[in-house]
Image (cartoon, rainbow, N blue to C red):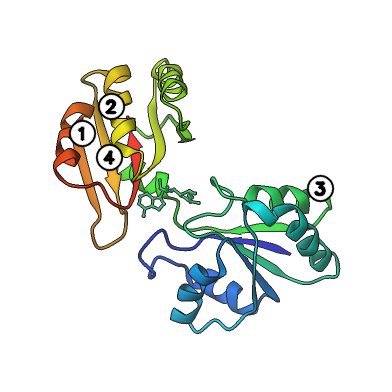
Amino acid sequence: MLYIVATPIGNLKDITLRAIEVLKSVDLIACEDTRHTKILLDCYGIKTSTTSFFQHNRLTKGQYLLKLLQEGKNVALVSDAGTPGILDPGYNIINLAIANNIAVTVIPGAVAFVNALVMSGRPAHEFFFGGFLPNRKIARQNRLREWAKLKCTIIFYESSHRILASLEDIQVVFGDKEIVLARELTKKFEEVKRGSAREVLGYFKTRLPRGEFVLVV
Ligand code: SAM
């Protein structure tokens, strides 16, 4: 069985009893970053062996994990934060397992965009999750223009080094529409900022934006 195990998006207590049980019982845990996951495993006294599975070794390591699964071993997959498969290499091994008739199950838990969407107070009966915006300004604005045609809540991820540039582009495309910016969810400095992109931009221009971000428009 391939277990896709959700882990915390910040607060180490945000993990289910079942996730801990599975991580203790499998033969191997495939981690996006073994050093990062070690902190979680140490916290819960989980002694299971780990191996890395990330963007650049996903093809070779994927074959290795598949071989173990075909031999009847149980493997758990975790990412650095939240639910594997949502914008991390999890997708590749899940597909490989499905294509090879390996049983796959998901141990549910945190997903950053779900947390932000619910916390935003915006309509959540219909929404669009866009992942990350493109790196380049023109492509970013074009992507935002596409999203602006949608008649539902739009959610996407952003990193600290690009948040100011993205807020400028959101202002260009969405004008004065109110947005919600969720930062460092479940962590000590969790913060939710509401206002137009101009207002949110003004706020973060006076305080260096740190951490991880989810935007809700
Ligand atoms: N698999 C993860 C999930 O289930 O949400 C997402 C992985 S993606 C590579 C990482 C991005 O998720 C970050 O750049 C940030 O935008 C968002 N994210 C993760 N943890 C977060 C947190 N605690 N607060 C705000 N955003 C977070």
Q: Are marks 1 and 2 in contact (CB under 8 Å)?
A: yes
Provide the residue designation for mark 3.
99
N-terminal of the pair, mark 2 or mark 4, is 2
Q: Which amino acid does label 3 sit on?
A: Ala
- Please give the label number shown on residue 181: 4
Q: Is mark 1 on a helix, strand or loop?
A: helix
Q: Distance between the residues labelled 3 and 1?
A: 45 Å
- Please give the label number shown on residue 201: 1
N-terminal of the pair, mark 4 or mark 3, is 3
N-terminal of the pair, mark 3 or mark 1, is 3
Q: Distance between the residues labelled 1 and 2?
A: 7 Å
Provide the residue designation for mark 2.
168
Task: Tell me: is circle 3 under 8 Å from ligand 1.
Answer: no
Mark 3 or 1, which is nearer the eye?
A: 1
Mark 2 or 3, which is nearer the eye?
A: 2
Measured as percent of width and height from the top left, residue 94 is found at: 70, 51
